[in-house]
Image: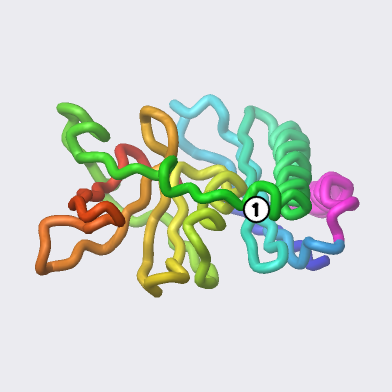
């Protein structure tokens, strides 16, 4: 298993490196057969208004899937403890899903419903950050909507971008404010929306909040 440690606004000392290896290796010990690479990102926020300044983020690449966990506190070692426990739970959940995949392979079309911009943000005006502060790269293997939904649960984000195996297009699946999931798809320029299976036109919109 390959374990890589990165630091932002912090020096990765031998003591920190040893502690990360100890905790993360223990967390993934029972999942070594599905874990290929572990990426650990440690950071310290310099903003005095942020109480939880010490953050630990773990990203695991397992059989083409991405499993992610992030925790923060006022103590870096405590953050590492918390994220190690969380990633262990995520791995256990992932392994259980793989084992029960055939029993759980049900259509999610009814659960994934389109939602209008008004429903998502109400009277608020969408705002984007003033600058790009981080860039991530990852492989985008084609997958079904059901597989993308599982990935969304594993990475712990509000949304997940994927390449739809049926259309070859880039889609985004996200958690809806009122429960269930939504999917954002490219809009056909010749129509005002996307036509679903019952012949009705459905409009897709960007959700209220994306956390990266």
Query: Which residue is pictured at 78% across the width and 62% down the height?
Result: 35
Quadrant (top left, top right, bottom left, bottom right) of the N terminus: bottom right
Q: Position of residue 191 (x, y in %)?
A: 11, 62
On screen, residue 4 above or below 139: above
Q: Main secondary structure of the magenta part?
A: helix
Q: Secondary structure at mark 1?
A: strand
In-image side of 45 versus 103 (left or right): left
Magenta residues? 12-32
Q: Which residue is mark 1?
A: 67
Residue at 18 percent of width and 66 percent of height: 188
Q: Is residue 78 magenta?
A: no
- Give residue 70's position: percent from left, percent from top: 61, 42
Residue under the point 75% across and 39% down: 89
Q: Front-most of 149 and 57?
A: 149
- Image coordinates of residue 185 in percent, x first then y, are 30, 59
Say if the magenta span includes residue 27. Answer: yes
Q: Nearer the viewer, residue 86 or 142?
A: 142
Q: Is residue 127 left or right of residue 160?
A: left
Q: Residue 102, how many percent across, how many down?
A: 70, 54
Quadrant in the picture for residue 176: top left
- The reply to whether residue 77 is in sight is no
Location of residue 75 by image quarter = top right
Residue at the outermost front position = 198
Q: Is residue 161 visible?
A: yes
Q: Is residue 78 positioned above or below 26 on the image?
A: above
Which residue: 15% across, 27% down?
123
Check the image and tell me how it is coloured: rainbow
């Amino acid at each position: 298993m390959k374990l890589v440690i990165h630091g932002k606004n912090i020096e990765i000392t031998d003591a920190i490196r040893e502690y990360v290896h100890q905790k993360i290796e223990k967390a993934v010990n029972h999942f070594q057969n599905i874990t290929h690479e572990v990426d650990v990102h440690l950071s310290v926020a310099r903003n005095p208004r942020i109480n939880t300044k010490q953050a630990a983020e773990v990203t695991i690449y397992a059989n083409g899937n991405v499993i992610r966990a992030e925790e923060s506190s006022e103590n870096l070692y405590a953050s590492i403890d918390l994220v190690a426990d969380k990633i262990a739970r995520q791995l256990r959940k992932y392994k259980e899903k793989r084992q029960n995949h055939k029993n759980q392979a049900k259509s999610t079309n009814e659960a994934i419903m389109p939602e209008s911009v008004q429903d998502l943000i109400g009277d608020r005006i969408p705002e984007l950050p003033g600058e790009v502060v981080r860039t991530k790269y990852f492989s985008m293997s084609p997958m079904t909507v059901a597989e993308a939904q599982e990935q969304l649960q594993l990475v712990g984000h509000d949304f997940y971008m994927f390449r739809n195996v049926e259309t070859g297009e880039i889609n985004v699946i996200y958690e809806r404010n009122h429960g269930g999931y939504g999917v954002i798809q490219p809009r056909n320029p010749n129509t005002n929306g996307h036509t679903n299976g019952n012949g009705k036109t459905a409009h897709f919109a960007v959700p209220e909040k994306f956390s990266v």
